[in-house]
Image (tube, helix red, strand yellow):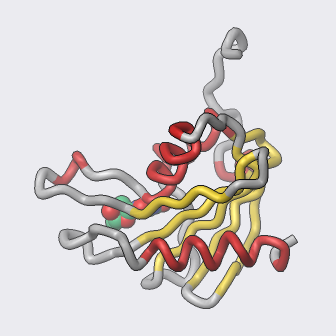
């Protein structure tokens, strides 16, 4: 499965170079595959008012939703400075809005996918409201 997601890793690594991270100096890239098979990318965008920035995963999710899609099949995340990055807590909840517990999360270093986990492993017992459509 990891090899099949190399396109996601490459897209995440490419968009990481667009990150706006002058405060943390920690560029991150994310690329997700939606149910249609399209790839959507995002990078972290920081702000001088620090809490106002957003994560790479958040940007990729926003691009998918803006394009009219609502299902994430899998996502790759990369940070050049980390041997293996895992999505932050807020992004895990944002992913859970659009991804099933068995959706694959590819955790990458600068040269490729290091480990693949499921959203359910990253966010067990996620908050969910049964009436949500
Ligand atoms: N960041 C992400 O973009 N994704 C994550 O999963 C973890 C953290 C960003 C937020 C901030 O711009 C920088 O990394 C340092 O925390």
Quarter of the image where the C terminus is located: top right
Question: In this image, 95 relative to 34: left or right?
Answer: left
Q: Residue at x 27, y 70 (%)?
A: 21
Q: Position of residue 31 (x, y in %)?
A: 59, 63
Q: Position of residue 111 (x, y in %)?
A: 61, 90
**In the image, ligand 1 is in what quadrant?**
bottom left
Q: Nearer the viewer, residue 38 or 5?
A: 38
Q: Residue at x 55, y 87 (%)?
A: 110
Inspect this view and state whether residue 125 appears. Answer: yes
Q: Residue at x 27, y 77 (%)?
A: 25
Q: Position of residue 40 (x, y in %)?
A: 59, 56
Q: Position of residue 90 (x, y in %)?
A: 46, 44
Judge whether 80 appears above or below 130 on screen: below
Question: In this image, 41 relative to 52: left or right?
Answer: right
Quarter of the image where the N terminus is located: bottom right
Q: Residue at x 51, y 78 (%)?
A: 14
Question: In this image, 117 relative to 40: left or right?
Answer: right
Judge whether 24 appears above or below 51 on screen: below
Q: Which residue is situated farthest in the right direction here?
A: 1
Q: Which residue is situated farthest in the left direction here?
A: 48
């Amino acid at each position: 499965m990891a090899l099949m997601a190399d396109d996601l890793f490459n897209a995440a690594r490419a968009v990481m170079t667009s990150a706006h991270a002058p405060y943390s100096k920690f560029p991150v890239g994310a690329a997700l595959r939606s149910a249609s098979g399209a790839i959507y990318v995002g990078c972290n965008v920081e702000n001088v008012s620090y809490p106002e920035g957003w994560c790479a995963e958040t940007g990729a999710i926003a691009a998918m939703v803006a394009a009219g899609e609502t299902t994430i099949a899998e996502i790759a995340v990369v940070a050049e400075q980390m041997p293996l990055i895992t999505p932050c807590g807020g992004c895990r909840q944002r992913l859970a809005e659009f991804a099933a517990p068995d959706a694959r999360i590819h955790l990458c270093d600068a040269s490729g996918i290091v480990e693949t986990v499921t959203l359910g492993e990253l966010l067990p017992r996620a908050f969910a409201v049964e009436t949500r459509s």
